[in-house]
Amino acid sequence: MKPTILIIDDDTSLRRVLEYNLQEAGYQVIAAADGEEGLRLFSEEAPALVITDMKMPGMDGLQVLKAVKERSPETLVIIITAFGTVDMAVEAMKLGAYDYITKPFNRDELRLTVGKALQFTGLAAENKRLRSQLSDRSDFRTIVGASRQMERVFHIVRKVADSEAAVLITGESGTGKELVARSIHAHSGRRDAPFVAINCAAIPRDLLESELFGHVKGAFTGAVRDKTGKFQLAEGGTLFLDEVGELPLELQPKLLRVLQEKTVEPVGGTTAHKLDVRLVAATNLDMEKALADGVFREDLYYRLSVIPIHLPPLRERPDDIPLLLRYFCAKHGNPQVGFDRQALDTLVKYGWPGNVRELENTVERLLIMRNSDTIAPEDLPDKIRPGFGAPSGTPAVFNLPPEGYSLEQLEREVVVAALERNNWNQTAAARFLRIPRHTLIYRLEKYGITPPEK
C-alpha cells in the first residue's frame, strides 16, 4: 500500500485537484481546509508527507511547517506558493521544508516532486535501519564471548544503556570493564557526545580532585590557569570512573554531592556548574569488604551501583577462549594462524590469572615467536604448559621447604616480588596481588619494605 499524504489548503478547488491527482497515482490522501484541522489529522493519521499552502487564514504554511517538525522531525513537508512569494518558500526550506512548488503547476510536476520526497523518506528510513543494525553488530565487536555469562552481560548492557541510571561494573583486572563501559555509551542516546575515562588509582591523591572537578587559577601552588575537570569535559556524554574503589575517602563526599545535585564546583571556585553527565564506574575490589572496612562510603556505593554488572573471570568461561584466540590472531594481523588440539586444550585449561588481557599478551607473543602457522604445545610459555612449575591453571609462586617456613616471611617475599615485577609501582602491584592499594601500603609499613635507591 502506498504511503499516506496530508494536504492542507483553504482553496477548495485546488485541494480537490490535488486529492484527485495523488489518488490517481495510487497514494492514500487525507485533506484539511486549514492549519488547525491539518495538525489534528497529522496527529491522528501520522502521514508520510505533508503538502501545505503557504498563505491561509489563521495558521499559515510556515506555522504548519514548524508545528509538524516539532512533532515529527523526520516527516517531509512540501510548500505550495504563488509565483510572487517564492522568497517565502525559500525561507520555508531554511526552516526544514523539503521542497516547494509554485502555482500554477501541472500534474507531472506535482507527481515528480511528491515521488522524489517519498523516495527520500524511504532512503532515510532504510539508512536509519542499517545504522541501527550496524550499531547492534559492532558495539560489542571488541567484547568477545558466546558463553552464558557473557550473553547475560550483553543483555544487561542493551537493557540499561538508554537509561540514565549509574552503572557499577565489577570484576577482576583484565576482564574488559572499560570495554563494557564504552559499549554502554555506544548503545545510549549519548553516543555522539564525549566518552571520558579516568583511572582513579593512576593519579596521585593530591591531583585527583583537580582532575575530576577542575580548578581555578590560583587555587593552589602551581595552578597558573583555570583547568576544566573530567566531569565538565564529559558534558552531554558519559564519564567512566575506573578503579573507583581506590577513590580517597576524603574525596568521596564531594563526588556524592556532585551526583546528588548534578552540579560541580572547581577547586578554589565559588560558582557551581550544572552537569548533564551519565556516570559509569568500575572496580576490581570486593566492595562489600571495602564497606565493612570503612574505606568506602556506603551512601556513595549505593549511588554508584544502581545497575550492577559483574564480569566473570576468564577461568569461569573457558568456552570463550577459542573465540578469543581467533579474534586476537585476526586483531594482530595473523588470521591464518591456528592452534593444534593439544595446544588449544592447554590454553583452555590454564587458569589465566590476568584474564583476557593476559590472553591477548600471550597471543601477541606467540604470533611473534611462532615457527609456523600452527601453534603447538612446545610454542607455549613455560608457565602455561603442564609439567612446568605448578599444575596447569595454578600459577607457580613458591616452593615450600620440607622443614616449614614463616608465613610472615613468605608474605613479605611475595609483596617484594610483586613490586619488583611491576617496577615498584604500588597501584600495579596491588592490582597484581588482587588487594586494595591501602592494604599493600599497610604491608609495606608492617614489614619495612622500601624501594631500592636508583
Image: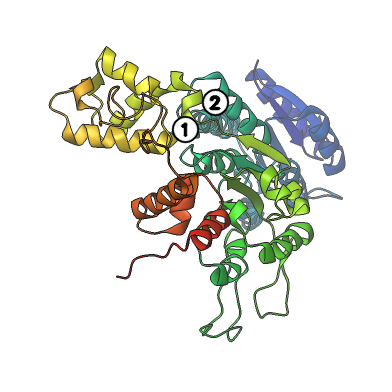
Residue 213 left/right relative to 387:
right
Q: Nearer the viewer, residue 376 or 131?
A: 376
Would you say the residues marked 2 and 1 are in contact, meaning their CB atoms lie under 8 Å apart? yes
Q: At 73% across and 48% down in the image, what residue appears? A: 292
Looking at this view, name the residue that lies furthest to the top: 341
Q: Residues within 10 Å of mark 2 (few under 14, many from 20)?
A: some
Residue 411 vertical position relative to residue 143 in the rendered view, above or below: below
Q: Amino acid at mark 1?
A: Ile
The x, y position of residue 189, in whole percent, is: 63, 43
Residue 178 left/right relative to 422:
right
Quadrant occupied by the C terminus: bottom left
Residue pointed to by mark 2: 150
The x, y position of residue 59, in whole percent, is: 83, 49
Q: At 57% across and 54% down in the image, what residue appears? A: 439
Give residue 38's quadrant in the image.
top right
Q: Nearer the viewer, residue 76 or 279?
A: 279
Quadrant occupied by the N terminus: top right
Residue 209 vertical position relative to residue 372 in the rendered view, above or below: below
Q: At 72% across and 30% down in the image, what residue appears? A: 47
Q: How is the image coloured?
A: rainbow
Residue pointed to by mark 1: 143
> Does residue 322 appear in this view?
no
